[in-house]
């Protein structure tokens, strides 16, 4: 039952509707249980009830703190109202661990007794360890610093989260086996149901809700709640930990967040992402955002190093920092709210950025002596980013059903085809420019290697006159071929997917014309 309440919290239920429907979760009762169990390590049932209730309270408090600090929740995601509940402030994390360890120790004393007691002790031990590991994982991921981010995330992923998933799956197997027995089904016998109904009252705080109709929170069955908790733990593993460990470039970070956006990730995972997206003045706590943008200009935008190394380009990359961060953050929002966020905050900055990029290109052409060429490195780069935002915004309009008529939908798909086509053309130009620059760099490196090869004297030929020595230079080698990096492969896949989207949108437009 405590797992079902935790699942309700993560599904958007308020404190009075979830955690505090448990009689044992109230502060006064928890304090009374501390006093009663002080010095007593034999009554396993009481220790388990106390430890489980305290874990539920502290997990709710931790999840609520993460949600408040990230500040991306919506009413349908998460409820922060506590109705005056304080989540046992006198009982800190050290007392929580002591309570769990004491309860597990009391359960171990039941080994060797009857089979039923031993099976119950095994199940309850798994449940307490699962909740404590989940508490440790969320605590670690919500208190990262730039000095330890990689180490702590790796340890959390391989230790706490791995233990969480293992114990949850073991617990799931036990519940599945128990459900086959009618006497040990999830609902339990009549006596068990009466006990649960007395300990968990969903209408306990009906008076706090006022006279308005109250949302009827339907608690899932333990097996279904456990399945959802396993899904949330897996999301934290791949959405949060992998982002912090593998997000080494701006393009890769954006692609990983786009996957998070379309996967309907739980509010806890999304809050942890936003909480760790930028801290200690570093993106993901590891990278200077201006440096990442400069590298992205060179890798994705084909901007020459001679341009990215200039003071003007570094200053412009610094100005791009906040708009780029906002563009990343919007992908962690509730998908229903992304449209309004883009419209209100994200789009307003980019027209002036495009104008500044055009002015920078004019300045670079003058400084680099390219007045006769149509070099538009910065303009292409900023236009590509702007088109991606517009494409996402228009796609959301269609996905969320904001456009209802046939004519509006046809215009939207026509516009999506236009945006996709423009992006494909710009990305192709930038990609070709980058490949040419890399091939030129490889050729120059090969020529420098050839110039460093010493001349090797050979024996005098008989057909030559005496005293004349022949010499030869080793045969010139071909310059090393350009090898694609992982980023190049990812950019190529993105371009291919974008081309497919363009083709689909064009097809939809043509079908709609008939």
Image (cartoon, rainbow, N blue to C red):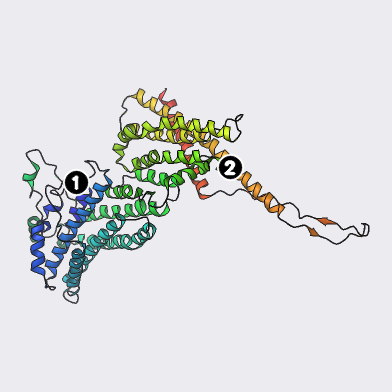
Which part of the image, by quadrant, shows the C terminus?
A: top left
Res 216 → quadrant: top left
Residue under pointer 1? 80
Residue under pointer 2? 435
Q: Nearer the viewer, residue 323 or 189?
A: 323
Q: Nearer the viewer, residue 490 or 462?
A: 462
| Residue at x 77%, y 57% (from the top left corner) | 455
Closer to the chain start, of discs 2 and 1, is: 1
Residue 464 lies, in percent from the top left, at: 92, 57
Which part of the image, by quadrant, shows the N terminus?
A: bottom left
Say whether residue 193 is visible. Answer: no
Callout 2 touching callout 1 (CB < 8 Å): no
| Residue at x 42%, y 48% (from the top left corner) | 288
Q: Secondary structure at mark 2?
A: helix
Q: Nearer the viewer, residue 284 or 243?
A: 284
Residue 60 lies, in percent from the top left, at: 20, 53
Residue 111 lies, in percent from the top left, at: 19, 75
| Residue at x 21%, y 56% (from the top left corner) | 59
* Left or right of 269 on screen, residue 61: left
């Amino acid at each position: 039952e405590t797992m079902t309440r935790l699942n309700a919290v993560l599904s958007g239920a308020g404190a009075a509707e979830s955690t505090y429907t448990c009689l044992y979760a109230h502060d006064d009762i928890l304090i009374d249980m501390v006093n009663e169990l002080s010095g007593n390590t034999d009554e396993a049932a009481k220790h388990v009830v106390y430890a489980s209730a305290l874990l539920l309270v502290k997990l709710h408090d931790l999840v609520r703190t993460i949600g408040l600090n990230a500040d991306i929740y919506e009413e349908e995601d998460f409820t922060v109202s506590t109705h005056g509940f304080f989540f046992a402030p006198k009982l800190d994390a050290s007392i929580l661990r002591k309570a769990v360890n004491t309860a597990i120790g009391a359960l171990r004393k039941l080994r060797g007794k009857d089979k039923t007691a031993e099976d119950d002790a095994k199940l309850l031990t798994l449940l307490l360890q699962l909740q404590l590991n989940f508490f440790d994982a969320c605590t670690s991921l919500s208190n990262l610093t730039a000095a330890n981010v990689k180490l702590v995330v790796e340890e959390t992923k391989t230790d706490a989260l791995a233990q969480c998933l293992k114990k949850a799956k073991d617990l799931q197997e036990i519940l599945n086996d128990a459900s086959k027995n009618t006497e040990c089904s999830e609902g339990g016998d009549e006596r068990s149901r009466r006990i649960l109904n007395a300990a968990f009252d969903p209408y306990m705080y009906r008076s706090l809700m006022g006279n308005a109709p109250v949302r009827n929170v339907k608690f899932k069955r333990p097996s279904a709640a456990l399945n959802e908790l396993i899904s949330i733990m897996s999301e934290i593993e791949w959405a949060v930990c992998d982002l912090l460990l593998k997000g080494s470039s701006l393009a890769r970070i954006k692609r990983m967040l786009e996957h998070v956006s379309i996967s309907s990730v739980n509010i806890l995972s999304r809050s942890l992402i936003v909480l760790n997206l930028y801290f200690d003045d570093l993106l993901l706590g590891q990278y200077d955002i201006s440096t990442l943008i400069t590298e992205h200009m060179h890798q994705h935008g084909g901007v020459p190093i001679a341009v990215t190394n200039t003071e003007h380009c570094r200053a412009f990359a610094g100005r791009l920092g906040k708009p780029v961060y906002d563009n990343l953050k919007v992908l962690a929002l509730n998908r229903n709210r992304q449209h309004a966020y883009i419209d209100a905050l994200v789009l307003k900055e980019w027209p002036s950025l495009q104008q500044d990029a055009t002015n920078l290109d004019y300045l670079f052409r003058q400084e680099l002596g390219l007045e006769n060429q149509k070099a538009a490195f910065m303009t292409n780069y900023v236009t590509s980013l702007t088109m991606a935002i517009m494409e996402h915004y228009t796609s959301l309009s269609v996905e969320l059903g904001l456009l209802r008529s046939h004519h509006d939908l046809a215009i939207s798909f026509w516009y999506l085809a236009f945006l996709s086509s423009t992006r494909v053309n710009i990305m192709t130009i930038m990609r070709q420019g980058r490949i040419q620059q890399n091939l030129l760099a490889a050729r120059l490196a090969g020529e420098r290697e050839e110039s460093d090869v010493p001349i090797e004297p050979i024996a005098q030929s008989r057909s030559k006159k005496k005293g004349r020595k022949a010499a030869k230079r080793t045969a010139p080698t071909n310059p090393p071929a350009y090898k694609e990096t992982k980023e190049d492969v990812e950019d190529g896949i993105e371009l291919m997917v974008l081309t497919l989207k363009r083709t689909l949108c064009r097809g939809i437009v043509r079908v709609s014309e008939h």
